[in-house]
Amino acid sequence: MTTAANTVGERNAAPLEPGVWGVLATPFAGPNRDLDLPSLTRLVQFYEKCGATGLTVLGVFGEASSLSGEERTAILRTVATSTELPMVVGVSALATAPSIAEVTSARSAAGDRVRAVMVQINSGSPQVVIEHLHAIHAETNTPIVLQDYPVASHVTVSTDRVIEIVEACPFVCAVKAEAPPTAAAIARIVDRVSVSVFGGLGGQSLLDELAAGAAGAMTGFSFPEALVGCVSAWHAGDSDSAREAFIRYLPLVNYEQQPRVALALRKDLLARRGLIGDGAVRPPAAAFPEQLREIAADQLRRAELIEERGR
């Protein structure tokens, strides 16, 4: 088994390209909540128009755990034929064998368009995670984005453990840091290992994460153009413009990230913008709270005014 001691400094995966990797929502339609592939195509093309670096497909906010294998394949093929943007494909499984099956299926559906797969930390033991990642890479030869997202995995590890895992896995091309305080974690990771590190969580700490050395954002937001504007300005060396581009959207970011209903809130706003046909979610995800209808309309109105003033 390869260990951290003999892989430090021997990375064989190029760091994931910096920028915004938009996390795609999965649109549904009709009473049975069938896949709405035309809406998915429209959303994908909007991300491309906005200037996204790439797309994150079948992530937690893509409701991947509620999809059948056939639906996952349909989504990957739709994305692959709708844009030239590269993809990071989420792996829902925490165990090794089903994770390998998911990655193999994704590569079969989307081929070389799969830039990397995103695998969650699945154990509090670094050695268990290291063995898990090595097994996936040995079978699929696919670069891995390591996702530290305790809310979804129910696994909490220290930042030092994350670094230990990355050092022992030279095929890890990025870390998605979603265990608050994210900026502190990102600063420690980028100081120790030569991989790209991205923030998530809807962009709540994006400005601090960029200041800490993040390569960008790997997240969803109903106004992805705000994420792109912020990250692009930061990479151009203009931190003041980056803050100006994003800080006006922070009330909307905060609204979208409300616990338990965050997915429904974001999909509702995407539907209100006309980017998807319907904001429906699949159970067990919580539905949109009807009590927030007027608040959602006001949030959207204010965000659209920001867009108009920026044109």
Image: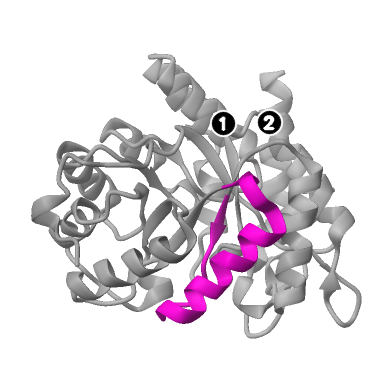
Residue 232 lies, with reference to residue 43, above or below; the image says above
Report the amino acid beneath label 1.
Val
Q: Residue at x 34, y 65 (%)?
A: 133
What's the CA distance linking mark 1 and mark 2? 7 Å
Q: Which residue is mark 2?
A: 50
Quadrant in the picture for residue 67 = bottom right
Q: Main secondary structure of the magenta part?
A: helix
Q: How is the image coloured?
A: one colour
Marked residue nearer the N-terminal end (1 or 2) = 2
Residue 176 falls inside the magenta stretch = no
Choose between 115 and 36: the one closer to the eye. Answer: 115
- Label 2 sits on what residue type? Cys
Specify whether residue 105 is painted magenta: yes
Q: Which residues are magenta?
A: 88-114
Of the 4 image quadrants, the one containing the C terminus is top right
- Residues at marks 1 and 2 touching, judged by CB atoms closer than 8 Å: yes
When the figure is inspected, residue 180 is found, relative to residue 194, above or below; the finding is below
Is residue 259 found left or right of 274 in the rendered image?
A: left
Q: Residue 169, located in which quarter of the rendered image?
A: bottom left
Q: Residue 152 versus residue 58: which sits nearer the camera?
A: 58
Per the image, label 1 sits on a secondary structure element best described as helix
Q: Residues within 10 Å of mark 1 (few under 14, many from 20)?
A: many
Q: Position of residue 148 (x, y in %)?
A: 33, 62
Please give the residue where the numbered disc 1 appears in the rendered image: 228
Point out the image quarter for the N terminus: bottom left
**Residue at screen point 47% across, 29% down:** 231
- Above or below, 207 relative to 179: above
Residue name at image x 49 percent, y 47 percent: 218
